[in-house]
Image (tube, helix red, strand yellow):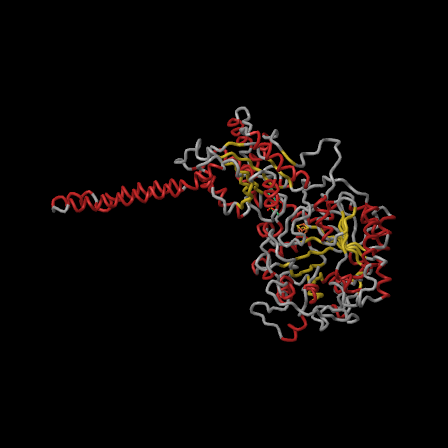
Amino acid sequence: MSETGRAVAVGVAAAVGVAAILGWKGVLAARESGAVEEAIEKAAGAVRDAAEATVKAVNAAATPLLAKQEDAGAKTKVVYATTTGTAKRVAEIIAEGISGGEAVSADVYSFADDLEDEAVVIFVMPTWTDGDAPESGQPLLAWLEDMVQDFRVDKSRFLGKVKFAVVALGSREYGKGLFCRTGWRLDEAVGKLGAQRLCLPILVDDSDSRAKIDNLGGRVRAAIERNETVALPEKPNRGQRRKAMLEETKASPLDDQEDRVNEMMLDDMEDIVVVGNTAAEPGAERPDMVTSSQRKALTKEGYKIIGTHSAVKLCRWTKHQLRGRGGCYKHTFYGITSYQCMEATPSLACANKCVFCWRHHKNPVGREWRWKEDEPDVIVEQAVDLHCNMIKQMKGVPGVKPERLQEAFNVRHCALSLVGEPIMYPRINELIDELHARQISTFLVTNAQFPDAIRNLQPVTQLYVSVDAATKDALKEVDRPLFKDFWERFTGSLESLRDKGQRTVYRLTLVKQWNMMEDELDGYAKLIELGQPDLIEIKAVTYCGKSDASNLTIENVPWHEEVRMFAEAICKRTNGAYGTASEHVHSCCTLLARKDIYLAPDGETWRTWIDYDRFHELVAEYKASNGEKKFTSRDYLADTPEWAVWGAPEEGFDPVESRFRKARKSTADDASTASVRPPVGLPPSKARLARESKNLEDVAE
Ligand SMILES: Cc1cc2nc3c(=O)[nH]c(=O)nc-3n(C[C@H](O)[C@H](O)[C@H](O)COP(=O)(O)O)c2cc1C
Ligand code: SF4
């Protein structure tokens, strides 16, 4: 309510209050008792006081109102809601371009300020999970939608003095039903409350270039200057069309029906103004996957971008082992040489928005490949060159062992897992061929959203799927997938994995309070039954610092003891099919392995290491025979050394390396403290605490 309204209300309330003070019966009784004059005097006094208060309040309210009217039109509010800051940046760009423009967060903005005067309000509104508004925008949107429903509100006039435009942020990859849905809802609600639309909603896709976003200021300014108003394009008989849509989707479950209708509505709005990637014209050149701003951000973080969609980065374990300070868990579990391992991806895009994503969702997303395709041989060649350049820079770094530095130029392993979804790259098989031709082993990690691509994948040294949750609901919460049929894709991927033949791995990334509850153990056991992986890696989530895009805190990072206990509990549920094979305490990582493949006939020796030379021979034979000469996991096993076995006193730390511990920081937010705090109800020994004492540097990649 405005100040004036509030003041008038005070006056009216006071007048009514006179009767309320005495009540009609009270008035009659007072007259009879002769106290009537006194009562009337009392009441009159109350009215006088109320009137005075009203006048005062009206005056007080009128002064700023008059001042406001003087510069009416000069102020344009750009109201934004945001989770990861994009909307705020866009709002500021727009506000800068408009004289008197001011960016205001939706959680402090109130329409009450704009009900009295002519006002221009530009909304910058992103769409988040399930098509909802960011938290800071939810109250405003809910209030507007409530007002639309409220029969007491005069819809033609409620926001009659407001002129508005909506800039809706989103990602096309969520499909038409969800793309910029919140922006649409906002536009609809504000429009229905009598506000005048300066232009049709402007939809901005995540992959739009900075130049396009910079342009928004100009477009909005032009709309304000034109001072024309527009209505949403009313399709001929829209009501009938809606009815037809409902009819068309009748057979679908309610949720699907709603989505489908939304999708059709968006189809109907094809003539809306869209900034951003409109569907590619047939024959039009495909865009680069990585936009210039994404390239800049990734480069800043140490990624070397190759061509238009690939990247390579020097893993810190490579640096560690170059200095003789220990290899990563893959050294412990499978015998890779960390300083000869290259971490790369041929697709920076993926189809998820995982809560623990270390890219904090600044990488592109997509449900299918819609970008340019670089040549696989060029990607591999450049990846190796860039990797070797980074190795070269290690020369002269204190502690680097000269003989290891020399060997490091001979890349022997490639972890196709850096970030994104490598299997999305349509020419992934050719890329793998290129790597194998150079005698480079391949560890490929997929996020289990592309079952067909897994089926069509040629043999790799070790094929991983990320199993981030045990149930459909939990997977949705943790991975925040783009696909609606994500669960079917996920289970389909596990089935595809079961039939591969070569080494397969489930990778479980444990996040406390998200996916490691006791009641989820049976769910994991079912998934294991489904895909029958050779190996199961169970590791603690890596905390990548605070991010607006996720609620993850250091508290969500489990201790090694907790990871170990969880791994043992899962193992028990496999009815003896798997055993606890190896662990790398250094990075809170454990390994379960199928006993029928990885336990030697003596029943004691684990064989989780890989005979890499043998693998390359097998691949060469497979290729030469056009895929006729098949081979399996059993054909390239090697013994796991004693120090790497589960429960060994070395805790998975290779004894030829020297342990190095950095001085520990001690802030509560410091990820380095993650593994030294005792797990709830399971206080470790002092010695164990000391052993586990480590820095962020030591957390698993
Ligand atoms: C977990 C998550 C869910 C999202 N869901 C949707 C969606 O349903 N529809 C859509 O159009 N965009 C969706 N997006 C894309 C965001 O709207 C887009 O990235 C936007 O620029 C974020 O704005 P902000 O940085 O101001 O929060 C989603 C992004 C994330 C990270
Ligand atoms: S799949 Fe990988 S890159 Fe994509 S959101 Fe999840 S963690 Fe990040």
| Place of residue 72 in the rendered image (x, y in percent of width and height, measured from the top left) | 49, 36
Horizontally, residue 101 falls left or right of residue 1, namely: right
The C terminus, quarter of image:
bottom right
| Place of residue 136 in the rendered image (x, y in percent of width and height, measured from the top left) | 53, 47
Residue 60 appearing in the image: yes
Q: Judge whether 102 appears above or below 222 on screen.
A: below
| Place of residue 57 in the rendered image (x, y in percent of width and height, measured from the top left) | 36, 43
* Residue visible at 24% across and 44% down in the picture: 18
Name the residue nearer the viewer: 232 or 210: 210
The N terminus, quarter of image:
top left
Q: How many marks?
A: 0
Name the residue nearer the viewer: 158 or 325: 158
Q: Judge whether 469 appears above or below 286 on screen.
A: below
Name the residue nearer the viewer: 636 or 229: 229
Name the residue nearer the viewer: 304 or 258: 304
The answer to which image quadrant residue 329 occupies is bottom right
The answer to which image quadrant residue 330 occupies is bottom right
Horizontally, residue 160 falls left or right of residue 635, namely: left
Residue 484 appearing in the image: no
| Place of residue 294 in the rendered image (x, y in percent of width and height, measured from the top left) | 70, 46
Question: Farthest residue toward the top?
Answer: 236
